[in-house]
Amino acid sequence: MASPKPTPEAIRLSASVDAAAVRLAALRTEVQRAETAEALARLRLGEALVEALCARSVAEARLRASLFDRYRTAALALRRPARRNRLRRLVEKTLARFGGPGRALVQAWAALGAGAALFDPDHYRANAPGPVGADPLAHYLVWGGDARLSPHSLFDSGFYADRNADALARTGLTPLDHFLREGAADGRDPHPLFSLEWYVSQAPELAATGENPVLHYLRSGAARGLSPHPLFDPAWVREGGGDLVWYLTEGWRRGASPHPLFDPAWRRVSGLDTGQAEPLARFVLTAKDTLESPGPLFNSETYAEARGEAMDPVKDPLSDYLAGGAWAVLGPEGLHPALVMLDDPEAIRSGMTPAEALARRLRAAT
């Protein structure tokens, strides 16, 4: 039996359906073209953004170096070179045995002046291996300095002495006295977490005055929220006002995180820290060799492999990343940094890296 002949209405309906299908296919093609064009445009925009951010990091590094050179030039005029030979040490020990008047002469001889702010009696007593007597400063000047006891939380005598052994041997001065007289003007850092160059870039007035950066930090910089080191972010430290002194004396014991990408709790669980000593300084000193990670959002080994020979050999991987390496490797989400940053205008304005931006988003979500 023959099939019924389509009606004119059915024919028109079929033609309309076919035409709609053709239009839909064309529309889908156009949408795909538009999406591809948008993706290409975003990628090009992102690449241009990354180039700009990379150029900004280079410019900032040059500005830091320039300001630091100017600071050192200004500070040279304030240097107070001195020598402390065996005879002077013998005289100091003799004077110290004469009680208060003798100890006062020892302190006057040292002439710390404003630098006395870098001697904290409570810190010195707490970290000395034995009793220090009624006058901790005199004890440091006569015995403690030579024994590398630290006079303040911001001055690590062992760190300073290890890096300036020749200068200390030549002058015979205690680490603190050498730093106050000559070391700061020469650009010698007093602590693993206090970078003079980094700090001076945030306090450009020091390029004119030559004031000791650590004394400036104690006098006003901490209250202004200035950062003493690339891995110490005052705005990230929720307690203690973002003060490095608070972090070093109390904050780390409370588990305070000093930077968005440094997670003390994660490191303890991972067996990288015991919780018995301040962890960030050790990371700064050793991670360039151990390639240990600072937290779950930054894998030092993966970063070092991707960075290759371009990584700064004197920096830990995280510091290298923050100093510009972020724009040369994939971001923490496995994406090109251009794609990570495009939808985060605040991160773009502030210059933070993709990993830092992710850490802040995660904190805001909790």
Image (cartoon, rainbow, N blue to C red):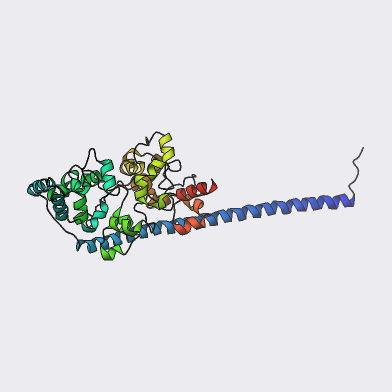
- In this rendering, the answer to whether 210 lies above or below 134 is below
Q: Return the residue found at the far bottom.
A: 208
Residue nearest the observer in this picture, 241 or 135: 135
Relative horizontal placement of residue 223, taking residue 134 as reference (left or right): right
* Whether residue 309 is visible: yes
* Whether residue 48 is visible: no
Q: Position of residue 102 (x, y in %)?
A: 13, 50
Relative horizontal placement of residue 343, taking residue 172 as reference (left or right): right
How many numbered circles are shown?
0
Residue at the (34%, 45%) spot, across then down = 249
Relative horizontal placement of residue 320, taking residue 364 as reference (left or right): left
Quarter of the image containing the N terminus? Answer: top right
Q: Position of residue 9 (x, y in %)?
A: 88, 52
Q: Position of residue 239 (x, y in %)?
A: 43, 49
Residue at the (37%, 39%) spot, across then down = 292
Q: Return the residue found at the far right.
A: 1
Residue at the (73%, 52%) spot, across then down = 22
Please identify the quarter of the rendering in which residue 226 is found. Answer: bottom left
Residue nearest the observer in this picture, 103 or 145: 103
Q: Return the residue found at the far left.
A: 87
Residue at the (28%, 63%) spot, across then down = 207
Residue nearest the observer in this picture, 47 or 56: 56
